Image (cartoon, rainbow, N blue to C red):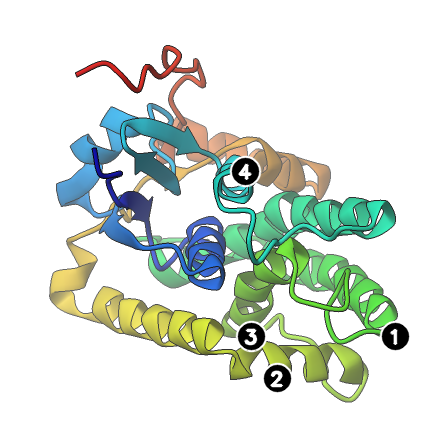
Amino acid sequence: MKERMITLYDSAFSPFARKVRLALEHKQIEYQSLDGLALVNRKALAAVNRRMEVPAIDHDGMVVVNSADIIAYLERRWPARALYPDLNAAWVHARSWERCADTFVDAILVNVSYWSWAKRDDAMPEGLHESARKDLELVYAALERDLATRDFISDGKLSIADLALFPHITAARTFRLGYDAARFPRLHAWQKRMRALPAMAEDLERMKAFLAQLGAAKGKDSYERTKIFWRGDRIEWMVAHGFHAWFGNEIQAQRVQWPGPSVPAPLHDPTAG
């Protein structure tokens, strides 16, 4: 029986979904995609991920959620064009940067983004943007350090560290949080190298098209823009930087969406059905 193509539940607005799509493109794996965050597709997303998060993949009935787990699955099934470095130290380094992108950097940029896409009648809390800039400067400095002797972040070739960080680094300018090219020339050269890769260029064009759609009247009604989806790392960053009162008000005003339970599905049986 012929193996079915992967179905990717993604969104051009999600850095995690963008990371998985870039991995699929890098590994030259065929897939079809569905915008899991579009309101018309919410039931389809809920059927594969009760947390209502993208990305998720369905491969012949094998459902994998969480971007890091999806990448690990792709590496296991399609080891060619590996995204994890061979050397132990580089492997640990790349995974550490992926975790930083998925938790720390994501929390900063997503928390700042609410006033650009969500339906808000308030202003950004005083000091939030400054806190975001200060923390991202730490990330930019560390990347400048790690790019001193190589073209890519953790290895002599493209790795998961590059794919995890690229969506965030390119989005930062949208929120006036981009790096200073004069202060971080190695980081700037890395981004230019990344943008020159076909998969990265296509990713950026897709993101631009999505933002244009979201800005249109029809696009504004296609996604949830009143209630904000919150999870651990984003809450932690807000509370740690003193914005707990603002977050408490969000809960009281019922402008918060919580993820569903993370209980795993039954063990997949490839012979069933």
Instruction: Give percent across and percent down for residue 56.
Output: 37, 38
Residue placed most toward the observer, 74 or 113: 74
Q: Secondary structure at mark 1?
A: loop
| Res 227 → quadrant | top left
The Cα atoms of the two marked residues, 3 and 4, are separated by: 35 Å
Q: Earlier in the sequence, mark 4 or mark 2?
A: 4
Q: Which mark is residue 52?
A: none
Q: Amino acid at mark 2?
A: Lys
**Mark 4 highlights which residue?**
76
Please say if the residues under marks 2 and 3 sit with CB atoms less than 8 Å apart. no
User: What is the quadrant of the N terminus in the image?
Assistant: top left
Q: Earlier in the sequence, mark 3 or mark 4?
A: 4
Q: Amino acid at mark 1?
A: Thr
Instruction: Give percent across and percent down for residue 94.
Output: 73, 51
Please say if the residues under marks 1 and 3 sit with CB atoms less than 8 Å apart. no
Q: Which mark is residue 173?
A: 3
Please say if the residues under marks 4 and 1 sit with CB atoms less than 8 Å apart. no
Q: Amino acid at mark 3?
A: Arg
Of tags 2 and 3, the one toward the viewer is 2
The Cα atoms of the two marked residues, 4 and 2, are separated by: 30 Å
